[in-house]
Image (cartoon, helix red, strand yellow):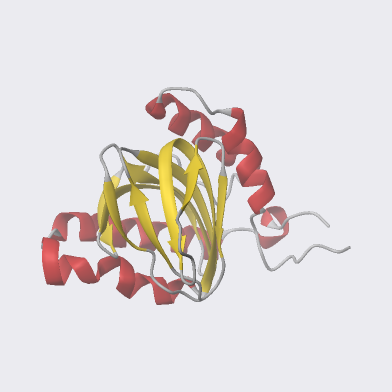
Amino acid sequence: MKRNTAHLFDPDVIDSIAQRHLGKPMPVMAEAIGQELKARYPELVDVSLPLVFNVSGGIMYQLKIFAMTPHEYIMICGSATGSSGFSGRHPAAFWDTILSGQANYMHQDQWESTSYKTGDRVFVDRWQAATIDFPDHCWMLEYARGALVWLLPFGIVNVFSNTLDFGSLFHLVRIYTTLTIRYFRRRPEKTRLSS
């Protein structure tokens, strides 16, 4: 079967990278994952970007963004403390690998939540939604694919309605701009997945 070359990243490759580094202290794990992603996708991954606070759907967490295109991103996201909220309902699919801690998801039409722990994969498809709870702490390697521009309002609305954290908004806009410019300047023949 021929692979869709419109997508630059493979969720199974991203998960396998995460799996190889489980059990390390979080800063060491993040660095190792970033370096392996950079080796795999050299023209698209930036390991130098800072952790940035964000609140989306009521969940307070930090983002370590490695790659972003108009249709895909890879990041580590999570919190060293408990947090909970709403995933949102987006025109994008999300593949998460739990790096550390626990995440409880309750999808629409479920009576019970599903608990995901270190090494587990979580998939939330386009237009699906869930309540998410990090009971203590949780860090995930997240890959998203879809119409990402429609995620931006969800990702920044709390700055204006709640947190007034314009410093983090500035960092997020700068990171998004930097990675978008890098995407459009890349050499497409070198960044496509092989068939």
Say if residue 6 shows up in the picture: yes
Q: In the displayed structure, does residue 7 sit left or right of residue 95?
A: right
Q: Position of residue 57 (x, y in %)?
A: 29, 65
Nearer the observer, 26 or 166:
26
In percent of the image, x 45 and y 64: which residue is there? 111
Q: Position of residue 169 (x, y in %)?
A: 22, 60
Which residue extends farthest front?
111
Q: In which quadrant is the N terminus drawn?
A: bottom right
Image quarter of residue 85 = bottom left
Q: Is residue 100 left or right of residue 2?
A: left
**Total numbered badges shown on the rendered structure:** 0
Of 55 and 173, which appears nearest the observer? 55
Rendered position, 139 above or below 87 = above
**Residue 50 appearing in the image:** no
| Picture residue at 38% right of the left edge, 28% below the top | 27
Work out whether 136 lies above or below 131.
above
- Using the rendered view, name the quadrant where residue 180 is placed: bottom left
Residue 39 lies in what quarter of the image? top right
Residue under the point 49% across and 72% down: 109
- Of residues 77 and 107, the one drawn nearer to the viewer in this rendering: 107
Q: Nearer the viewer, residue 189 or 50?
A: 50
Q: Is residue 74 rendered to the left or right of residue 135?
A: right
Please state, as top left, top right, bottom left or bottom right, where the C terminus lies in the image.
bottom right
Residue 136: x and y in percent read 30, 38
Q: Position of residue 81 (x, y in %)?
A: 25, 39
